[in-house]
Image (cartoon, rainbow, N blue to C red):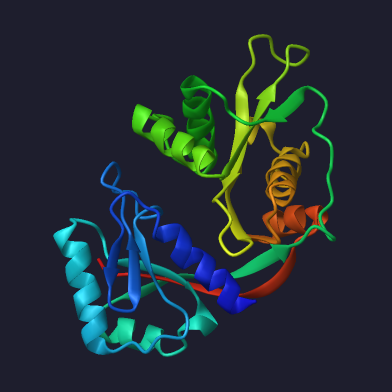
C-alpha cells in the first residue's frame, strides 16, 4: 500500500504547471503561488538517493524561488530523512495516512440546512477557497488564479465539493466549507483540504464533504482514496466515513 500511495504523490506533483525532475525527486511547482503546501517535492519510491541528489534538489528549488520542502510516505525512502537533516532540513510533521475503498465507504447525508455539490462557476470556486482558507486559520482572499487551479483540477478528473447553506438556514447561501481530491493515478487518489468554517462545525458537514468527495472518486473508477488526519477529531470524522489507518508520512523543510 505504501508504494501505491507514494507513486500517486509522484504522479500528482508531475502534473503541476512547472514540475521539475531532479534526479530521484519530482518537484511540484506552480508559478502562480508560493504556497509551500502546493510547491513541494517527493521521491520516487524505491530509488537510491545520495547527498548529491539532495543538494541538486535544493538548488532546483532555489532557482525556482521556492522554499525547499518535501512530503513523502516514510517507508518509500527510509534513509532520506538522515540525508535531509544533514543538509539542514527540519521535520515539520509526522502524520498517519488513512485509506478507504468502495467496500468500506459510508455515505452520511448532509445535515439539515446544507447541500453539498461541486463548484460550477469561478465565483463558487473562489467562495470555496475562501472558506477553506478561513477554516485553516488564514484570511479569505482567493484570487482568479485559485479558481483557475480548481477548474484545472476538475477538468483533469479531480473532485471538488463545497458545502453551502440553503435558504432554510440562511437566505442567499454561504459556503460553509469544502474539500477536493486529485485526479486518480493507478487507481489511487488523495483527498485533501477538508475544511469547515468554525461557525458551522459539529453539525456533520466535514463527514458529508469527505463522503461526497470519496464516493465521486469511486464512481469515476478510483480503487483507493487516501488522506491524512490532523488530530483526533478529524480522525474520528474520517473513520465514520470508512477510512482506516494504513501508514506514515513525513514532512521536512529547509528555511
Q: Nearer the viewer, residue 136 or 167?
A: 167
**Residue 130 location in percent, x, y?**
48, 31
Q: Using the rendered view, name the quadrant where residue 157 is placed.
A: top right
In the rendered image of this protein, does residue 46 appear above or below residue 4?
Answer: below
Q: Is residue 128 visible?
A: yes
User: Which quadrant does the N terminus fall into?
Assistant: bottom right
Please give left or right for residue 62 compared with residue 33 in the image.
left
User: Which quadrant does the C terminus fall into?
Assistant: bottom left
Please give left or right for residue 12 compared with residue 115 in the image.
left
Q: Nearer the viewer, residue 183 or 211?
A: 183
Q: Is residue 228 visible?
A: no
**Residue 179 location in percent, x, y?**
60, 42
Q: Nearer the viewer, residue 166 or 118?
A: 118
**Residue 191 location in percent, x, y?**
61, 53
Please give left or right for residue 122 compared with residue 204 in the image.
left
In the rendered image of this protein, does residue 44 appear above or below residue 97?
Answer: below
The structure residue drawn at horizontal position 69% and vertical position 47%, both measured from the top left corner, is 220
Q: Work out which residue is located at the far top of the displayed protein and give it.
A: 171
Q: Nearer the viewer, residue 187 or 93?
A: 187
Q: How many marks?
A: 0
**Residue 101 location in percent, x, y?**
76, 61
Q: Using the rendered view, name the quadrant where residue 248 is placed.
A: bottom right
The structure residue drawn at horizontal position 33% and vertical position 87%, both measured from the top left corner, is 49
The structure residue drawn at horizontal position 40% and vertical position 33%, both measured from the top left corner, is 148
Amino acid at each position: 500500500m505504501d508504494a501505491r500511495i507514494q507513486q500517486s504523490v509522484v504522479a500528482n506533483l508531475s502534473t503541476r504547471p512547472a514540475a521539475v525532475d531532479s534526479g530521484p525527486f519530482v518537484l511540484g511547482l506552480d508559478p502562480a503561488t508560493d504556497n509551500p503546501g502546493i510547491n513541494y517535492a517527493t521521491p520516487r519510491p524505491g530509488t537510491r538517493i545520495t547527498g548529491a541528489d539532495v543538494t541538486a534538489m535544493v538548488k532546483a528549488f532555489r532557482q525556482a524561488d521556492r522554499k525547499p520542502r518535501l512530503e513523502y510516505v516514510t517507508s518509500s525512502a527510509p534513509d532520506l530523512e538522515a540525508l535531509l537533516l544533514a543538509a539542514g532540513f527540519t521535520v515539520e510533521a509526522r502524520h498517519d495516512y488513512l485509506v478507504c475503498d468502495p467496500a468500506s465507504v459510508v455515505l452520511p447525508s448532509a445535515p439539515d440546512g446544507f447541500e453539498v455539490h461541486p463548484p460550477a462557476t469561478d465565483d463558487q470556486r473562489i467562495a470555496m477557497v475562501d472558506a477553506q482558507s478561513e477554516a485553516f486559520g488564514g484570511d479569505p482572499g482567493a484570487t482568479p488564479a485559485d479558481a483557475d487551479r480548481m477548474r484545472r483540477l476538475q477538468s483533469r478528473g479531480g473532485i471538488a465539493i463545497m458545502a453551502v447553506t440553503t435558504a432554510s438556514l440562511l437566505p442567499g447561501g454561504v459556503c460553509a466549507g469544502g474539500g477536493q481530491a486529485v485526479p486518480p493515478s493507478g487507481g489511487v487518489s488523495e483527498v485533501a483540504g477538508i475544511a469547515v468554517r468554525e461557525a458551522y462545525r459539529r453539525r456533520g458537514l466535514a463527514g458529508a464533504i469527505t463522503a461526497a468527495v470519496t464516493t465521486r472518486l469511486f464512481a469515476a473508477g478510483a480503487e483507493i482514496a487516501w488522506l491524512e488526519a490532523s488530530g483526533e477529531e478529524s480522525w474520528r470524522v474520517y473513520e465514520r466515513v470508512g477510512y482506516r489507518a494504513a501508514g506514515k508520512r513525513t514532512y521536512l523543510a529547509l528555511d
